[in-house]
Image: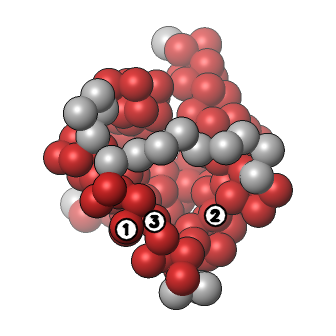
Amino acid sequence: MNYLELALRWIFGLQIAFWGLNGFFNWVKIPPQPPVIDKFVQACIEARFIMPIVKIIEIAAGVMLLLNLSVPLALALLAPIMFLITGLHALHNPKPGAILLPLVLPYACLWLFYGVTFLQFFH
């Protein structure tokens, strides 16, 4: 069980940190998306503060996951970002599985591992 949690943290942490850094350095060109998603992303970029903050949060949370530093906090910081990514692709992408499975599945499994920690806050 510990190896599974470690693997999920590394898989998800590397993805999130990479895509956060990609927002600043543009190593990988994002493939064309449906028009609704492109409009939303372009609006976030034109706002000039939304996208940099999202990318900084992704980098910080990815590093926290990789270093096993306050994993529940990292998951909580990523919750609104993951909600938007999941919603946009589930509703507007004709093939959402290519994006949602490798990104949302490890995140959801980590929530299951660390769900007890979150429940203790509300008990």
Quadrant in the picture for residue 52: bottom right
Q: Residues within 10 Å of mark 1 (few under 14, many from 20)?
A: few
Where disc 3 sits, the SS reads helix
Mark 2 = which residue?
55
Distance Cα–Cα, label 3 vs label 1: 4 Å
Image-based side of 25 in relation to 87, left or right: right
Residue 15, visible in the rendered structure: yes
Front one among 93 and 56 = 93
Contact (Cβ within 8 Å) of mark 2 with mark 3: no
Residue marked by disc 1: 40
The dot on residue 41 is 3
Sooner in the amino-acid sequence: mark 2 or mark 3: 3
Amino acid type of the residue that numbered disc 1 sits on in the rendered structure: Phe
Q: Are marks 3 and 1 in contact (CB under 8 Å)?
A: yes
Q: Position of residue 74 (x, y in %)?
A: 56, 55
Q: Position of residue 104 (x, y in %)?
A: 38, 35
Q: Tell me: residue 16, above or below residue 9.
A: below
N-terminal of the pair, mark 1 or mark 2, is 1
Alpha carbon distance from label 1 to label 2: 15 Å
Determine contact: label 1, label 2, CB under 8 Å: no
Residue 29 lies in what quarter of the image? top right
Give x and y (percent) for residue 123.
Answer: 23, 60
Report helix, strand or loop for mark 2. Answer: helix
The amino acid marked with disc number 3 is Val
Image: 111 above or below 6: below
Note whether 39 is above or below 22 in the view shown: below
